[in-house]
Image (spheres, helix red, strand yellow):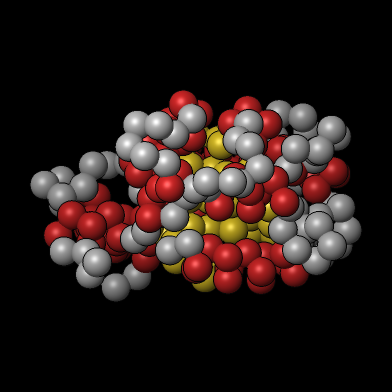
Amino acid sequence: MKIRKKITYLQKNEKVLSMSLNILVFYGSVRRDRQGIKAAKFVVRKFAERGHRVELIDPKETDLPLLDLMYKEYPSGQAPPEMEELARKIRAADAFVVVSGEYNHSIPPALSNLMDHFLEEYFFRPSGIVCYSAGPYGGVRAAMQLRAFLAEIGTVTIPSLFPVPKVQEAFDEDGNPKNEKMHRYIKTFLDEMEWYGYALKEGRVKRKKPY
């Protein structure tokens, strides 16, 4: 069954699924002149245009400390309020998008610190990788490491990437692409995120978790 037909089938099964997905977009930089936030805004807008509930998780705003205790290691009700609130949002999500730059062929420390505070909250939900760089390769070397990282914390990455080379030139300050072809380039990524989001949402409702 093709992706679009599968999505239509799942959307019609209203006893199991709502019509939209709840998507968190994790962004990974806290640098002063960060450029990737423009790509994150673009991704948020594209999912919202498809009728999904989307929220940007920005480490500058979340302001979690350097990892000491994971969320699950706090006694019930004693985690810091900002950590408790983010845990609630992750548990309520159907899918995650991770927007990452490439730092020394790896992922930004702010991104890993943000996501490392949680574990079980990510389980049985898909994730997609949006990678970017100031150069021509679009951060794909970081994306390969990010696949292993996301698998280890329990979220399955979709096959497609959405790489953005020369991110500083790709968008305006509000995340609008300067090249209108960008809307076409991201379509497969959006379609796959929807397919996996609906499929795993259906699985969480219909099937007993293995552990």
Q: Is residue 102 visible?
A: yes
**Residue projecting furthest to the front:** 75
Q: Name the foreground residue: 7 vs 32.
A: 32
The residue lying at 42 percent from left, 41 percent from top is 74
The residue lying at 66 percent from left, 69 percent from top is 145
The residue lying at 15 percent from left, 45 percent from top is 14
Residue 141 location (% of width, % of height) = 75, 69
The residue lying at 27 percent from left, 42 percent from top is 19
Where residue 137 sits, quadrant-wise, is bottom right
Q: Going by the image, does 33 lie left or right of 1?
A: right
Residue 84 location (% of width, % of height) = 42, 33
Where residue 114 sits, quadrant-wise, is top right
Where residue 195 sits, quadrant-wise, is bottom left
Q: Name the foreground residue: 205 vs 16.
A: 205
**Residue projecting furthest to the left:** 15
Q: Quadrant of the C terminus?
A: bottom left
Vertical side of 86 occupied by 211: above or below: below
**Residue projecting furthest to the right:** 135
Residue 71 location (% of width, % of height) = 45, 44
Residue 188 location (% of width, % of height) = 53, 61
